[in-house]
Image (spheres, rainbow, N blue to C red):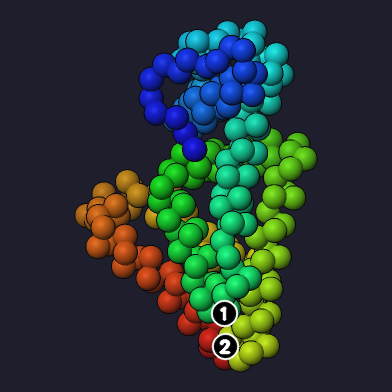
C-alpha cells in the first residue's frame, strides 16, 4: 500500500496516476508522523508536485488524510472480497478469512498505524467519510453468512455475532503489529520471528474456532 521511501516522479499528464503517487507518499507521511506531524511540503517534494496541486486534488491536508484512510480500508476490503469464501465449507472459509487478516496486518504496518492514529482522533475524520462505513458492511455480511451456515450445519455450536467475531480476529492481529515493539521489549520476544509468527497465526485460528465450537 505505501510507496518505498524516496522521491516519486508522477506523470504530470496522467492526473489519476499523479493522485495515486500523492496518496502513496501521503500514506507513509501520515503513518510515520501522524496527522499533526505530517507535512504537505514533504509530500509535495517527494512527489515532485506542489502544495497547490495537492490542495487542488484533495482540498486540504485533512481531506488528503481522509482519502488515505479511505484507500487503506478499501484495499483490505478488496482483498477480502476476492477470497473464494462462498465456495468453501464454513470452517475452511473462516480459517481462510482469519489467516488473510493476519497476513495482511503483518504485511501492512502502515495500515495499522493509520488506524491507531485515527483512534487517537476519536474517529472524527472517519465520521466525515461517505465510503468507509459502507466498505466494512461487506466483511460483516460475509462473516455472518459463514457463521449462520456453520451453526445450521452443526459445525459451530455457538450462535455468535459477526461483529463480535470480527473484533476478536482484528484485535489479536492488530495488537501483534501495533504493540510489536513495546510487547517485544517487555517480554523479550521478537514477534516478527517466523516461528513465533506462525504459532500466533495458528493460535488465533484455533481460538476463534474453539470459541464457536463450544457450548452457548
Residue bearing the label numbered 2 = 155
Q: CA distance from mark 2 to mark 1?
A: 10 Å
Residue for point 54% across, 72% down:
94
Question: Which quadrant of the view contains residue 207?
Answer: bottom left
Q: Position of residue 35 (x, y in %)?
A: 56, 27
Q: Is residue 26 visible?
A: no
Q: Name the foreground residue: 183 vs 31.
A: 31
Is residue 123 shown to the viewer in this render?
Answer: yes
Relative to residue 114, is residue 88 depicted above or below?
below
Nearer-the-camera pick, 136 or 191: 136
Q: Up-down: is 64 above or below 144?
A: above
Q: Position of residue 208 (x, y in %)?
A: 50, 75
Secondary structure of the residue carrying numbered label 2: loop
Q: Are marks 2 and 1 in contact (CB under 8 Å)?
A: yes
Residue at position x 65%, y 32% in the image: 66
Q: Position of residue 112 (x, y in %)?
A: 49, 45
In the image, taking residue 5 as reference, residue 13 lies left or right, namely right
Question: If you read the primary sequence from the N terminus, does the residue marked by circle 2 or circle 1 appear first?
Answer: 1
Residue at the (29%, 52%) spot, across then down? 192
Q: Are there few (<14), some (14-19), or many (20+) residues within 10 Å of tag 1? A: some
Kindly identify which numbered label has been placed on residue 137.
none
Toward the left, the furthest residue is 188
Which residue is the site of mark 1?
A: 89
Q: Is residue 177 above or below residue 24?
A: below
**How many residues crowd mark 2 within 10 Å: few (<14), some (14–19), many (20+)?**
some
From the image, state whether disc 2 or disc 1 is nearer to you.
1
Q: Position of residue 9 (x, y in %)?
A: 47, 15
**Dot 1: element:** loop
Count of residue discs: 2
Q: Which residue sits at x=46%, y=52%?
A: 104
Image quarter where the C terminus lies is bottom right
User: Which of 91/39 is in front?
Assistant: 91
Amino acid at each position: 500500500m505505501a510507496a518505498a521511501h524516496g522521491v516519486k516522479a508522477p506523470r504530470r499528464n496522467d492526473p489519476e496516476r499523479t493522485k495515486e503517487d500523492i496518496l502513496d507518499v501521503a500514506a507513509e507521511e501520515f503513518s510515520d508522523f501522524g496527522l499533526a506531524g505530517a507535512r504537505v511540503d514533504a509530500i509535495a517534494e517527494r512527489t515532485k508536485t506542489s502544495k497547490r496541486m495537492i490542495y487542488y486534488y484533495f482540498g486540504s491536508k485533512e481531506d488528503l488524510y481522509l482519502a488515505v484512510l479511505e484507500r487503506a480500508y478499501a484495499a483490505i476490503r478488496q482483498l477480502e472480497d476476492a477470497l473464494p469464501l462462498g465456495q468453501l465449507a464454513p470452517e475452511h472459509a473462516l480459517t481462510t478469512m482469519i489467516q488473510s487478516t493476519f497476513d495482511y496486518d503483518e504485511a501492512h504496518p502502515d495500515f495499522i498505524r493509520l488506524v491507531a492514529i485515527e483512534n487517537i482522533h476519536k474517529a472524527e475524520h472517519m465520521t466525515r467519510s461517505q465510503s468507509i462505513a459502507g466498505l466494512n458492511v461487506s466483511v460483516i455480511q460475509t462473516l455472518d453468512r459463514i457463521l449462520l451456515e456453520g451453526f445450521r450445519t452443526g459445525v459451530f455450536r455457538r450462535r455468535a455475532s459477526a461483529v463480535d467475531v470480527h473484533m476478536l480476529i482484528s484485535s489479536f492481529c492488530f495488537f501483534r503489529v501495533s504493540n510489536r515493539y513495546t510487547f517485544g521489549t517487555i517480554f523479550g520476544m521478537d514477534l516478527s520471528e517466523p516461528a513465533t509468527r506462525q504459532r500466533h497465526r495458528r493460535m488465533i485460528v484455533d481460538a476463534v474456532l474453539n470459541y464457536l465450537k463450544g457450548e452457548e
